[in-house]
Amino acid sequence: MTSRDTQPATRAHDETTQTAGRRNRRLSFVLGIIVTCQLMVAVDSNVVNIALPEIRSGLDMSGPALAWVFSAYSLAYGGLLLLGGRAGDLLGRRRMFIWGLGLVVAASILGGVAPDESLLIAARALQGVGFAFASPAALSMIAATFADGPERTRALGVFSMVTGFGITLGLILGGILTTLSWRLVFFINVPIGVLTIVLALRYLTETERHTGTFDLLGAILSTLGMVGVVYGLTRGSEGWAAPATVIPTVVGIVLIAAFVCVERRADHPIMPLRLLADPVRAGAYLTFILLMAAMAGTYILLSLYIQEALGFSPLIAGIAFLPLASVQFAMAKSAPRLIARFGRKQVLLTGVVLMMLEAIWLTTTHASTNYVTGVLGPFILLGAGLSLAFVTLNMTVLGGLEPRDMGAASGLLQATQQLGLSLGVAILTTIYQSSRAERAQENTGTKDILAHGMASAVIAAVIFTAAALLISLFIVKVPKPAGAV
């Protein structure tokens, strides 16, 4: 064969390579637009929480009113995630992504200029509504845009990476912006949200819209049920037998049970029960709840411990979380290669075990524990474990789905995460407060009291992760990828 004969084949190969390169660059840009929404979700909650003391003094808010700055967001976000996910399936995920972010931008402006507590709380609720529609759309667009396998694994790794980075960034930004003005923690969403909307309008293509009608009764029952359970759990620190905890939780559970009964008969259910018919997917959802409970509760306690026991300022406390975010970033980036080599099962189990070891380590916290000896190591274990477990569970939940179910599956995934968050924070903070009160009677000193509270509360996180390990071992039986060694 002459050199002339090989020229057409060479040109064809070059054109194919260039086409693949352009596609990869486009997908990377699209992924950047999509995950910016998740970055906003992760940053928003933490940046506002850091600013709560300044918000209280700035608007002269009472304690109960200040609590609603957090609760209004959590209830709206957690209560509407299932509806938001299904809306993306029926109305278009790009549309829900843009509309949701538009509402977040408008609500953030309202919160930034709010002259009193009523408008501020309303703004937080509207932020929750906006993210409840935008966030499931973002996750389902990843599942719809990136092919199941290594391509989607890398995309989900970036998604997890951004989540971890956003949490720490929220703490740091919260410390910086609050020193200038607490109103800036709301306005920070505006330029990011507007830019993301503009880029989404230009570069994101609408996903396939699936035929069907809204399951109105299911939407009402799921929303009220989730609101009841989340609200009840957020009041758990007041006592598990208190009416404010028991009544909304029980009512929420009853409404969710009624919701399941309605979904069994609905022609176009808001949450197709076939998503839970597969025991592997159902086990992955349950594992998500348990790991999220362990992570969120521990995260809150470490934030308190670093500031109250170690004396770190809010800004330094945020910087102290950087090792966690750095490890999470690195492991999320490495997760696709590890899954390709060892298989999802092994990577998932490794992640869960690392999170359990982190919780066990924290049970040894005592009065002389400092950042290096008692916090840095758990941060590293938690960051690595979160990335490995969450990337694998995301793949398990979103893999093998029919296109019409991606939005509903994404909404359910994030709803289970919100339930886990509320459960973990409620249980661990309740134990923390009661343990502190008991220790305080012994007059052993402030650091000892705080350390005892931490060590006692994280026993619950050990239990959560141990249960997640059992489920991962015996129920979440994910296959090893083809070609793995």
Image (cartoon, helix red, strand yellow):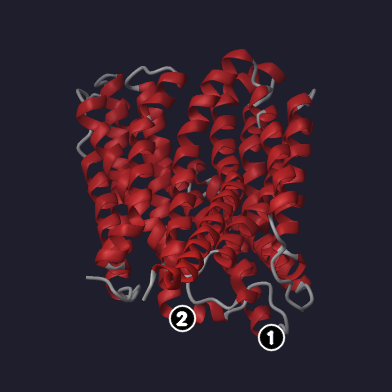
Residue 199 relative to residue 236: left or right? right
Q: 241 and 355: which one is in front?
A: 355
Distance between mark 1 and mark 2 Cα atoms: 19 Å
Which quarter of the rendered picture does the N terminus lie within?
A: bottom left
**Is 391 displayed left or right of 193 in the figure?**
left
Determine the image quadrant of residue 429. Answer: top left
Q: Is residue 464 visible?
A: no
Q: Earlier in the sequence, mark 1 or mark 2?
A: 1
Query: Mark 2: which amino acid?
Result: Asp
Q: Between 241 and 59, which is closer to the camera in this rendering?
A: 59
Q: Horizontally, is 485 left or right of 14 in the view?
A: left
For label 1, the residue is 265
Estimate the x, y position of residue 33 in percent, counting from the top left: 62, 47
Q: Residue at x 41, y 19 (%)?
A: 316
- Amino acid type at circle 1 is Arg
Q: Is residue 387 above or below residue 478?
A: above
Residue wearing tag 2: 278
